[in-house]
Image (cartoon, helix red, strand yellow):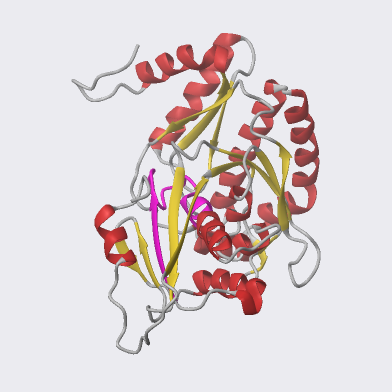
Amino acid sequence: VPPGLHAEVWIVAMTEPATKKQKSGGSGVQVATATCASNIAVIKYWGKRDSKLLLPINSSLSVTLDPLQMGTTTTAAISEEWEGDRLWLNGKEEDSSAQRIQNCLREIRARAGSDAPKGGLRIVSANNFPTAAGLASSASGYACLVAALGYLYKIDGDLSVVARQGSGSACRSVYGGFVKWEMGSKADGSDSRAYQVAPESHWPSLQALILVVSDEKKKVSSTGGMENSVRTSKLLKHRAEAVVADRLAAIEKAIAAKDFETFGKITMEESNQFHACCLDTWPPIFYLNDVSKHVINAIHAYNEQQGKIVAAYTFDAGPNAVVYTEDAHVVDLCRTLVAAFPPPAGTPVND
């Protein structure tokens, strides 16, 4: 059983009895497994200009995290002995006929053409971090689904356009390191794809601290929130038209130069403006809670104490924080955060 998957579900999915319609001489089971990481945007994606094709109103940029700590593992198998497609996520069977899943399957099968393996699919997927809690689980999930299917169907070339049709930000999780999702301009979305700005090896001292404020499923989904923001927020329209392009150019330069102060300032400004757009939405959307706001204050106080920006928070559509910093400050920053947000009594804390 691949690491990270629920053994009992994987065994049920992969050893399903043959259907009565199966004739002798079947081709057996073909299996492929992939692992993809969550990505955390520093230039945010919020809002679609085409909801069917999942085309964004602005380009975005993210950092792909370590899949062993913030990732999804997906196994996809196909056999002529199976009828239909089935999907399990985190140990629970889900509806494989959901539109976004079918978008990905349809595109993969179309690319594979007449050489595509035949039969029913069995897909088992598991995250090693909270799902639907503002930590980009859908991004790693759909990227991993597409990657596993790509291996299974032997698809060559860029898969980010396929992953985008499952979840917009999933196109960025197809690659490691620093990844830009170019919004594109074509009506069919063929130029709305991701590419790597810099590899994961480019800035080895950069670290990401994941502060799980709440692992509960958020009340307002990203999809629903985006739709309301695009429809009602004037600030979001201004941001997409007048702010994002300059910030993208500036943060790409900062990444190339490993300039943390500029990188950190833009990252925090972006996070703040994104949540300001959520508040400007009608009715307003509250993804941050009181603890989230205390995290923001703690990071600003820490930077003031250091005399410069050495830590930078960002929040996606949820209360959980990702704090970027560099190796030299990790231990001291962790101690500061543990002191500010002490764990329950009796919890062991590493020195």
Q: Is residue 52 visible?
A: no
Q: Position of residue 7 (x, y in %)?
A: 27, 53
Q: Is residue 166 visible?
A: yes
307 up-or-down from 98: above or below: above
Taking the magenta stretch, the answer to whether it contains residue 75 is: no
**In the image shown, does 2 or 289 lie closer to the viewer?**
2
**In the image shown, does 81 or 303 lie closer to the viewer?**
81
**In the image shown, does 22 or 128 lie closer to the viewer?**
22
Residue at position x 45%, y 49% in the image: 72
88 up-or-down from 211: above or below: below
Q: Position of residue 57 (x, y in %)?
A: 71, 59
Q: Is residue 99 left or right of residue 204?
A: left
Q: Position of residue 159 (x, y in %)?
A: 65, 59
Residue at position x 27%, y 65% in the image: 12
Extreme residue toward the front, this view: 25
- The stretch of residues the image draws in magenta is 120-141
Taking the magenta stretch, the answer to whether it contains residue 127 is: yes
Residue at position x 63%, y 19% in the image: 309
Q: Position of residue 205 (x, y in %)?
A: 61, 20
